[in-house]
Amino acid sequence: MCGYRWTGVHYKGTKLSCNSFRNSGRTKPRLFERFQANMDSITPLQQMVSSCSGALLTSLFVTPLDVIKIRLQAQSTPLSKGKCFLYCNGLMDHICVCENGNGKAWYKPQVRFSGTLDAFIRIVRMEGIKSLWSGLPPTLVMAVPATVIYFTSYDQICASLRLRMGEKADLAPLLAGSIARVGSATLISPLELIRTKLQSERQSYIELSGVIRSAVHNEGWLALWRGLGPTLLRDVPFSAMYWYNYEKGKAWLCRYNKTTEPTVSIAFTSGAVSGSIASIVTLPFDVVKTRRQVELGELQARKLLPQASSSTYKVMKRIVAESGVKGLFAGFMPRLIKVAPACAIMISTYEFGKAFFRKQNQANRPGLTLHTTNT
């Protein structure tokens, strides 16, 4: 209830006042939990459907921007066999390995572009509008499940923490965002390793299983989570700051607009601002992660073992030595342009989906009337 204090509630014909929750030590938790459950009235399945819709819509909007960016980069610095580049569909970053010298590969420009707008027009005119979503289907196989796990876990964990943290409930989004990101990244990391190997080495599933067994035998099970450290170093602080600022911004905008439900515009604005802040603060970690990912991908493509010099700390030292401290903030504007709309579209779609299901559930579950006063 953004900016509102509830003074009483009719639940199944019974008037429950604030005093009902304050005065009875035994009744308070039970009544409050029942009241909270009815007000939220969103099942995990409905949260999953909402986040899935947001993931698909975000990838459809953001992918063309990255496809054009990759084409322009390949034009200035041609991609040769075994080289890697970073591909992002607005939901996840993926390392792609150049397979061969085929000039018709989707990530290689067929003609010379003079800029972003020119690239957009020429790709649509010469290759068809579908080319703007080149490379998207394979990555969605992992990106959508990871996003669904992440958003659903966040809501479930945050709701649980709010009930347990009492006066410190404002910190629940920060903790919930961190925990949810660690969980989703840990689950998806082995799949990303398998996807990269399939793409770079063109192995059959039988051959791939042999390679994975050999890696596990020689290096232990942690070999499946190689590269997870740099990912968490960037994504966990980003997630913690994003959700904390988003919830604060959403609450403030709800109070400012005198509404108890966040509208699509409120969610969109809060998501864009909080995503921008988090992306700026975590940019050095993003630069290090990208450099290390590319190096590991190219070593795997050449079937070489990762070297000690590819550790996160040494990559950061090398970047500072080569380009100075400003090298850790390279790509500031492209990252901001990509992250802000992606966060805004994803969270506003997610909130819209939850609001839709909440209204449906309340329509099917009559008998709950909330009385509030503006504070």
Image (cartoon, rainbow, N blue to C red):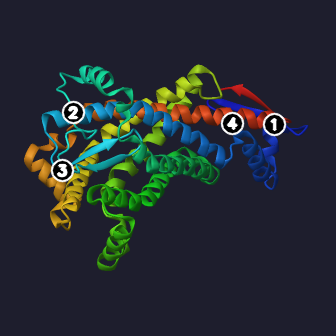
**Residue 37, horizontal then vertical, whole percent:** 73, 46
Residue 172 seen in the figure: yes
First in sequence: mark 3 or mark 4?
Answer: 3
**Residue 314, horizontal then vertical, whole percent:** 16, 59
Residue 279's disc is none
Q: Which residue is mark 4?
A: 357
Alpha carbon distance from label 4 to label 2: 44 Å
Q: Decide which of 345, 101 is in the foreground and name it.
A: 101
Between label 1 and label 3, give the one nearer the viewer.
3
Q: Decide which of 144, 99 is in the foreground and name it.
A: 99
Q: Where's the N terminus, which quadrant?
A: top right
Tag 1 and tag 3, C-beta contact below 8 Å: no
Q: Residue at x 37, y 39 (%)?
A: 278
**Relative side of 329 to 372, left or right:** left
| SS of the residue under disc 1 | loop
Q: Which residue is mark 3?
A: 83
Q: Residue at x 23, y 34 (%)?
A: 71
Instruction: Name the residue furthest bottom.
Output: 217
Alpha carbon distance from label 1 to label 3: 56 Å
Q: Which residue is mark 1?
A: 364
| SS of the residue under disc 2 | loop
Alpha carbon distance from label 1 to label 4: 11 Å
First in sequence: mark 2 or mark 3?
Answer: 3
Q: Decide which of 75, 44 is in the foreground and name it.
A: 75
Q: Residue at x 35, y 37 (%)?
A: 134
Q: Decide which of 215, 367 is in the foreground and name it.
A: 215
Q: Which residue is mark 2?
A: 109
Q: Residues within 10 Å of mark 2 (few under 14, many from 20)?
A: many
| SS of the residue under disc 4 | helix
Between label 2 and label 1, give the one nearer the viewer.
2
